[in-house]
Image: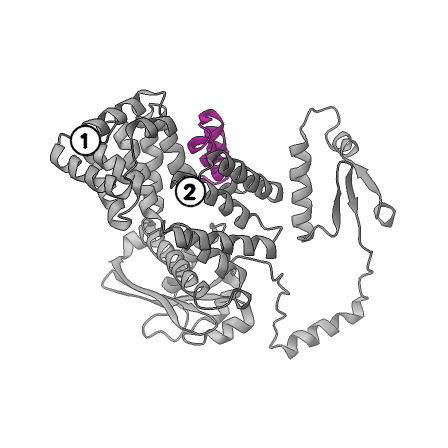
Amino acid sequence: MTDFLGTLAPRDTLIERVWGGVAVTDDSLTQCIADIRRALGDHDRALLKTVPKRGYQLTGEVIALPPAQNAGTAIAAADANGGIILADLDPRDVLPTLAVLPMRGSFETRQDPLGIFVADEIANALGRSEDMNVISRLSTAQFWGELGQHSNLRQALNADFVVSGLAHSQNDIVVLSVELADADSGIALWSDRIRLPLGPLMTDTDWVEHVVSQLRNAIMVNEVRRVRSRPLDDLKLFSVLHGAVGLMHRLSPKDFNEARSLLRFVAEKAPYNPAPLAWMARWHVLRAMQGWSEDVQQEATSAIKCAEQALDIDPENTLALTSLGFVMTNLLHRLDEAHGYYDNALLINPNDAQARALRGMLLAFTDNGSDGKRDVERALHLTPRDPHRFFYLALASGVHLSAENYDRSVLLAKESLRLNKTHISTLRMLAAAQMGAGDEDASRATVAELMRLQPDLRVSTWTQSAPSREYDNGKRVATLLRAAGVPD
């Protein structure tokens, strides 16, 4: 084993040894190297080094395992810490950690199967998320009955948030009381009370999706508050990241620029985590789409660079793949390439709501609105309480506008604007949909508000930048906007 340490392995040699006569690209080797680094925990690339333009070099030292008779030392250390040896986490880990406790019954003095089932469903749903760590259910089972004792969990499980509550049934009606608390302070960040028949609880998943979306939203809101109330050096990186994402979607120039500073901070502190880079790519696209940049091509270049850096770290990062699709669609109008990025993201995670909604909108741009409806409606189903739900509603409105389902488009656009009343593209879609539905007065009123927010809007300039400009959909929307009063 020691013979391999320090030896340079050229890229061509590695490809030949691993794949033989099979033709593969450098991307295949890059992905394998990334997988090896993850398995080794080599976050800073200190063990498996990249030698630019030459290959890779394995470094380190071989440490002999301690003899079996010394195992008692570790056991003694565990006993001194209450039987638990805590993980030595890398401080650059940007993911929040949640512990989901078994739910208590109202008057139960022992664990109840119903409470265990509810906690398992919530933990399993949260565990499918890529943006948080969820403590294993076998680890949390022993903490049944620890309501209000969050400091115990903080010490024993190193959890940032605790999900706990009550679950009891009365005459086939189940009552759930679920709470999310900050593990450090014990302060409740969110709580809800749900009543539903026992049958749907066991067979349907709507209640689980509701709880999970509320939990995610509460964490996001909490981190936005924290990044504005405490110095960055005092905050965990995941708090900064979640706060940045929240600010980025408020669509205020001041908040938007603050989000960029926060994302840069996280990227510098966690250079081998793909999340801040992938979000930075999205930031550049949104900047161009909101009209806050004078150089759209430069924003596209910066976005692609950030997304590719994220994929170099994790080739299966769906946020980075989706961000590349976003760039190709909205800034470069390379729609075939965008479709490929969205497809790849959904192959990795079929429940990625962003990739699904954006692919649906892409289909609408290319006169395939009837096919796009399936994607955007499923994305809405996946995001019932998402803090960025206005975005999904807006995309769904655009797809139904393309399919000439004008009434549905109006309904969705109005709900999106209720959540974010200044989203320019949604106002454009609403005006066009109202005109298509024959409600000219409402359409002209919407255009008046649109022109107040964007006085330099012209149909001709919108058409030049629209991904759908070469398709019937784009031409039809342009005609509807002219009819509604947008200057040509």
Residue 271 numbered tag: none
Residue 424, x across and y down, in percent:
30, 41
Q: Residue at x 61, y 72 (%)?
A: 84
Against 108, residue 4 (above or below) is above
Magenta residue span? 321-350
Q: Residue furthest right?
A: 3
The front one of 193 and 200 is 193
Which residue type carries mark 1?
A: Ala
Q: How busy is the neighbourhood of tag 1: few (under 14 within 10 Å), some, or many (20 plus)?
A: many
Residue 265, x across and y down, in percent:
55, 56
Residue marked by disc 2: 286
The front one of 310 and 488 is 488
The front one of 233 and 15 is 233
Q: How busy is the neighbourhood of tag 2: few (under 14 within 10 Å), some, or many (20 plus)?
A: many
Which residue type carries mark 2?
A: Leu
Q: Secondary structure at mark 1?
A: helix
Residue 371 seen in the figure: no
Q: Secondary structure at mark 2?
A: helix
Q: Is residue 11 left or right of residue 116?
A: right
Q: Is residue 20 left or right of residue 230?
A: right
Residue 389 seen in the figure: yes
Against 306, residue 18 (above or below) is above
Q: Main secondary structure of the magenta part?
A: helix
Q: Is residue 66 left or right of residue 453?
A: right
Dividing the picture into quarters, in which one does residue 287 lie?
Answer: top left
Q: How is the image coloured?
A: one colour
Distance, label 2 to label 1, CA atoms, is 26 Å
Sequence-first tag of 2 and 1: 2
> In the rendered view of the protein, which quadrant contains the C terminus?
top left
Residue 318, x across and y down, in percent:
50, 41
Residue marked by disc 1: 484
